[in-house]
Amino acid sequence: MRRRGVTVLVGALLTALLSIGVLGAPIPYVVLGPGPTVDTLGKENGKEVIQVTGRETSTSAGQLRLTTVGVQPTVKLRSAIQGWFSDDEAVVPRELVYPPGESREQVEERNAEDFKVSQTSAETAALRELGYQVRVVVKTVAADGPAAGALRPGDVVTSVDGEPVPLAARLTELIRAKPAGTALKIGYTRDGAAATAEVTSREQDGRPRIGVEIEQQQPHPFTLNIDLEDIGGPSAGLMFALGIVDKLTPADLTGGKIIAGTGTIDDSGRVGPIGGIAQKLVGAKEAGAVAFLVPAANCAEAVRNPQPGLPLLKVGSLDEALTALDALRAGGQATRC
């Protein structure tokens, strides 16, 4: 009996030690949780998030808070189990955040680049909303390309076959919309005078091209800068754009309330979907938000993960977001998810 008791005790001890080892072992998952929120109208680390010089800006009584997702990159079984039972966290396969073949540093570098692009697109969309139009300017013309002799550096491209070219991306779309070898009527201005040139596209790298390099310009009589560190990815675009519009117009878009949101934005002001909407809703609620701007494509997921007392406002564009904020200020009903 004594030997048997010792055996049972040793077995229990070994089982406990093995359990501790298993629970402490890393697993190929990451835990997603609510990340920090930032008021795009306020300061972060003592500096204005949106900085404007050369023009007077307005102040707001409320806040426009971008939301983020926190990622726990190294997960042990114990943390994963806690995450699975948490209402605020999600446990997902590691490759969804860190694709195979890419290091954590490479992913973070890409996220940082996406963040910069989101700032640029937010600025473009917001300034277009305020009436500062984009110019699509010819930067270089290939000497042996289709546009040689027809277009020059400095020409502002205005149309293709009568279709307006408000953005650089639209010029590319219009050229690629017709097969290589198509004669295109390119509208442009040179030294302020409007003209039209016929340019026949040519296939290059498998796509129709006209042999020009272009750049997008948006003249405005002030400087604009977004200064925010330690955040990555493209999902802050919408809230940056709203913050810029708020600062450069007299109206307080917030109506004195804390409004949170998320969403990518492109140069034309279209709002795109993002990841981690459930965790961002939790972060918004904790920050005291009274409404949340949700990209239209994320509405179904947001509805499945509601936060009590936090209305979900559906937006597909910058214009729709501004309309939703107008309705909130007026005490009306904005479009819900």
Image (cartoon, helix red, strand yellow):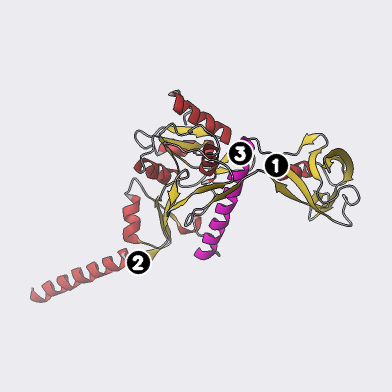
Mark before the other along the chain sequence, 1 or 3: 1
- Compared with 28, 56 (above or below) is above
Query: Where does residue 225 sit, x and y in percent of width and height?
Result: 56, 50
Quadrant including the N terminus: bottom left
Q: Whole-Å distance between the Cαs marked 1 and 3?
A: 13 Å
Judging by the rendered image, the residue that carries numbered circle 2 is 25
Query: Where does residue 186 sit, x and y in percent of width and height?
Result: 84, 41
Judging by the rendered image, the residue that carries numbered circle 3 is 269
Find residue 11 and name its label: none
Mark before the other along the chain sequence, 2 or 3: 2
Q: Can residue 241 be seen at all in this image of the molecule?
A: yes
Q: Whole-Å distance between the Cαs marked 2 and 1?
A: 54 Å
Query: Which residue is located at x 76 percent, y 43 percent?
Result: 171
* Image quadrant in which you'd find residue 15: bottom left
Residue lying farthest to the bottom in this orientation: 3
> What stretch of residues is rendered in magenta?
103-130
- Compared with 167, 207 (above or below) is below
Q: Can residue 99 be seen at all in this image of the molecule?
A: no
Q: Whole-Å distance between the Cαs marked 2 and 3?
A: 46 Å
Q: Secondary structure at mark 2?
A: loop
Q: Nearer the viewer, residue 140 or 33?
A: 140
Q: Nearer the viewer, residue 122 or 181?
A: 122
Q: Nearer the viewer, residue 281 or 195?
A: 195
| Label 2 vs label 3, nearer the camera | 3
Q: Secondary structure at mark 1?
A: loop
Residue 104 colored in magenta in the image: yes
Judging by the rendered image, the residue that carries numbered circle 1 is 134
Query: Which residue is located at x 89 percent, y 52 percent?
Result: 148
